[in-house]
């Protein structure tokens, strides 16, 4: 979302009436943009991260930490800076769902040089310092995935109380006051209201409580008959979480489709590796990740669509929330692994096919468009379908999936891009930079070595659930594509031979995938898979890399290697240990104000480098990250993809 306001939101009733209008024009807009841009080629690798942050206010006297609802004030200042010097600023700041949240990205995307990997962490550090400068002394900007006591009594500063009976309350939550939703932009409250109205009731998010010896059942607010459930009832519980995303540009549409597919099976694996949110509304839960929470928090499906009642008013049963893992692959190699039936309207599909879109892309877009718009602004109703893409973007940007296939925006120099969206936000800039650099490097390795990670979509879905289990990173196994020793091996000079592809007839069979631990996926399994980290190392040997960048990347790889092997623990596991070992913890699953305060203070010390937590980060990490590119490195070999016409 850009800086400018979108205008006046329509009521739900008006929005609902225009759902088919948005669908019809959105699909036309996609067909038009496709034909304008399908042959665009030769774009270079560009990439950038998005980190979301929570502003925390510490009451040191009473030892209570709260979220500070000052994002609008911070953004006023940060965006003024941007408007004054749009090309020169080193960071860009955008509103997020919570009035206590902000999202920061680099001022410009990073480019295709190896040395750019050395700039990310410094840029993240700059962002944190930039915000810290305008905070009060008792406040802190933190890249934590969830505020542990979000929705617990008096969790905001200033304190507001939920008011579910207020006719103007957008979510009617018993726990999450409307004031905690970003107020200056009408979109957030509008979407909240419309999701609830479309669904026909409040959203219902359920998490199993972590049962300790003194855990009191039923948990406060548990649904009838489900005493061990921590119930959450507002969009804010999910959309109010922070995450780490990255976008990269492909050389053309085919490369984008390929990378979209190849990274999709890695989403649950990266979710498990970055797990960082075990505590909700002040309770330890059985889940380590935000994913199911955020998925349910925007689940606008009606009872009919969820299969609870026979279809009468709605067109389809819909298997998933509009926030979830992807449902189909987009590349020709992926087609054979699309084993989950895709819901879409035959007429929409036919229109896309008649419009010249191939079957895989047509079904992808038709599937996105089974969703109705949940936010429409009066100024945006009538558009020029030859040029505008707002109706397409309206539906595209409210399908919040693990991967996003992003067409070039109108009238820009930007190419086809892919967004990687599963990762949870990590405490330190070092960790966040490590994850981002790792994934971008992985895209280079996939292209250079023509790796193939495809497994059936149903197996990716299974992995998504496995990934969220307590300590999945160390304890669970994940479906992963099987390789044979013959077809994929590393010698001293890099990888020879190509990972085995789809069988010639394109069929999949049971022998194509096996269960691996996260450690085996990242670090290798004897005789079968070399491991993602060794593959990246091998790729790097063939690249010209300056010593500082090499050192930084090596630190990142070592960190990832250790977290995957279990030598280091995930943020979620570390947080659990902090709670369980806290002197005030009563073995009752409750994360009290005091425990929350101490946990967040500890996190603050870690992110500022004042404290080293050996189980989380090892013995300290000293990357050689830099603020800008030394001129001598500009000549470096650019990392290209597989583009035939470079
Ligand atoms: P969204 O919220 O829609 O995902 P943002 O604008 O917040 O998008 O973030 C997009 C990310 O993509 C930023 O990190 C930005 O630096 C990066 N980016 C910008 N232009 C390009 C480009 N041409 N190719 C790849 N990434 C880009
Ligand atoms: Mg963004
Ligand atoms: Mg965001
Ligand atoms: Mg209220
Ligand atoms: Mg994004």
Image: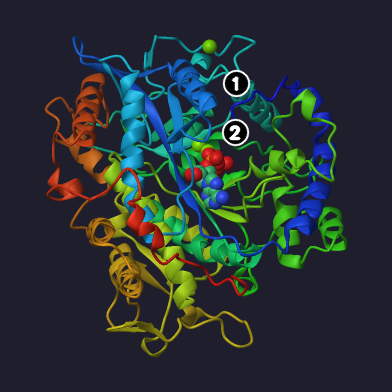
Q: Nearer the viewer, residue 250 or 372?
A: 250
Query: Would you name the residue on which mark 2 appears?
Result: 1
Snapshot quadrant of residue 428 = top left
Q: Label 1, secondary structure: give it.
A: loop
Snapshot quadrant of residue 497 = bottom left
Q: Residue at x 61, y 75 (%)?
A: 644
Residue 250 visible (yes or no)? yes
Quarter of the image that includes the C terminus: bottom right
Q: Is mark 1 within 8 Å of ligand 3?
A: no
Q: Position of residue 620 (x, y in %)?
A: 15, 47
Q: Position of residue 39 (x, y in %)?
A: 72, 64
Q: Residue at x 30, y 14 (%)?
A: 136
Residue 567, label in figure: none
Q: Position of residue 280 (x, y in %)?
A: 37, 32
Q: Is residue 296 above or below residue 422?
A: above
Query: Would you name the residue on which mark 1 appears?
Result: 185
Q: Nearer the viewer, residue 50 or 501?
A: 50
């Amino acid at each position: 979302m850009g800086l400018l306001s979108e205008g006046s939101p329509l009521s739900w009733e008006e929005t609902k009436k225009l759902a088919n209008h948005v669908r019809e024009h959105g699909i036309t807009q996609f067909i038009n943009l496709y034909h304008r841009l399908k042959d665009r080629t030769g774009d270079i690798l560009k990439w950038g991260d998005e980190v979301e942050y929570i502003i925390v206010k510490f009451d040191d006297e009473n030892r209570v930490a709260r979220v500070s609802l000052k994002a609008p004030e911070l953004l006023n200042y940060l965006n003024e800076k941007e408007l004054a010097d749009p090309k020169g600023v080193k960071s860009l700041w955008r509103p997020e769902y919570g009035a206590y949240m902000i999202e920061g990205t680099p001022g410009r995307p990073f480019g295709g040089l190896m040395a750019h990997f050395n700039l990310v962490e410094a840029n993240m550090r700059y962002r944190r310092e930039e915000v810290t400068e305008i905070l009060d002394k008792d406040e802190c900007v933190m890249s934590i995935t969830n505020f542990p006591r979000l929705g617990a009594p008096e969790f905001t500063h200033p304190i507001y109380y939920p008011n579910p009976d207020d006719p103007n309350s957008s979510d009617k939550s018993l726990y999450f006051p409307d004031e905690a939703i970003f107020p200056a932009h009408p979109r957030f409250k509008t979407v909240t209201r419309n999701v609830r109205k479309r669904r026909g009731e409040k959203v219902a998010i359920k998490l199993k409580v972590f049962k300790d010896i003194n855990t009191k059942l039923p948990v406060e607010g548990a649904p009838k008959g489900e005493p061990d459930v921590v119930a959450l009832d507002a969009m804010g519980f999910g959309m109010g979480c922070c995450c780490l995303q990255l976008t990269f540009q492909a050389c053309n549409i085919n490369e984008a489709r390929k990378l979209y597919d190849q990274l999709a099976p890695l989403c649950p694996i990266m979710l498990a590796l970055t797990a960082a949110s075990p505590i909700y509304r002040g309770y330890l839960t059985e889940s380590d990740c935000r994913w199911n929470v955020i998925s349910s928090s925007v689940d606008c499906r009606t009872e009919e669509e969820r299969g609870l009642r026979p279809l009468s008013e709605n067109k389809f049963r819909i298997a998933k929330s509009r926030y979830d893992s992807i449902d189909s692959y987009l590349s020709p190699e992926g087609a054979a692994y699309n084993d989950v039936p895709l819901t879409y309207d035959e007429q929409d599909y036919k229109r896309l096919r008649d419009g010249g879109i191939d079957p895989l892309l047509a079904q992808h877009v038709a599937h996105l468009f089974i969703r109705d718009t949940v936010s429409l602004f009066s100024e945006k109703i009538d558009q020029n379908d030859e040029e505008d893409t707002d109706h397409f973007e309206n539906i595209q940007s409210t399908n919040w999936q693990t991967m996003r296939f992003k067409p070039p925006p109108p009238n820009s120099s930007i190419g086809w891009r892919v967004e990687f969206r599963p990762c949870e936000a990590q405490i330190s800039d070092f960790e966040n930079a490590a994850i981002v650099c790792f994934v971008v490097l992985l895209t280079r390795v996939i292209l250079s070595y023509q790796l193939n990670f495809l497994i059936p979509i149903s197996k990716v879905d299974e992995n998504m659930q496995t990934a969220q289990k307590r300590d999945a990173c160390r304890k669970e196994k994940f479906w992963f594509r099987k390789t044979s020793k013959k077809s994929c091996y590393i010698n001293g000079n890099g990888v020879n031979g190509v990972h085995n592809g789809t069988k010639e007839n394109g069929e999949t069979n049971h022998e194509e995938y096996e269960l691996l631990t996260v450690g085996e996926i990242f670090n290798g399994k004897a005789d079968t898979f070399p491991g993602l980290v060794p593959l990246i190392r091998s790729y790097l040997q063939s690249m010209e890399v300056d010593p500082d960048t090499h050192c930084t990347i090596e630190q990142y790889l070592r960190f990832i290697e250790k977290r995957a092997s279990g030598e280091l623990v995930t943020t979620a596991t570390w947080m659990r240990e902090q709670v369980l070992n806290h002197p005030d913890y009563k073995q009752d699953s409750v994360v009290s104000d005091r425990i929350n305060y101490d946990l967040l203070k500890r996190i603050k010390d870690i992110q500022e480098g004042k404290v080293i937590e050996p189980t989380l980060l090892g013995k300290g990490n000293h990357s050689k990250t830099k603020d800008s590119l030394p001129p001598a490195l500009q000549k470096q070999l650019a990392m290209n993809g597989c583009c035939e016409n470079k």
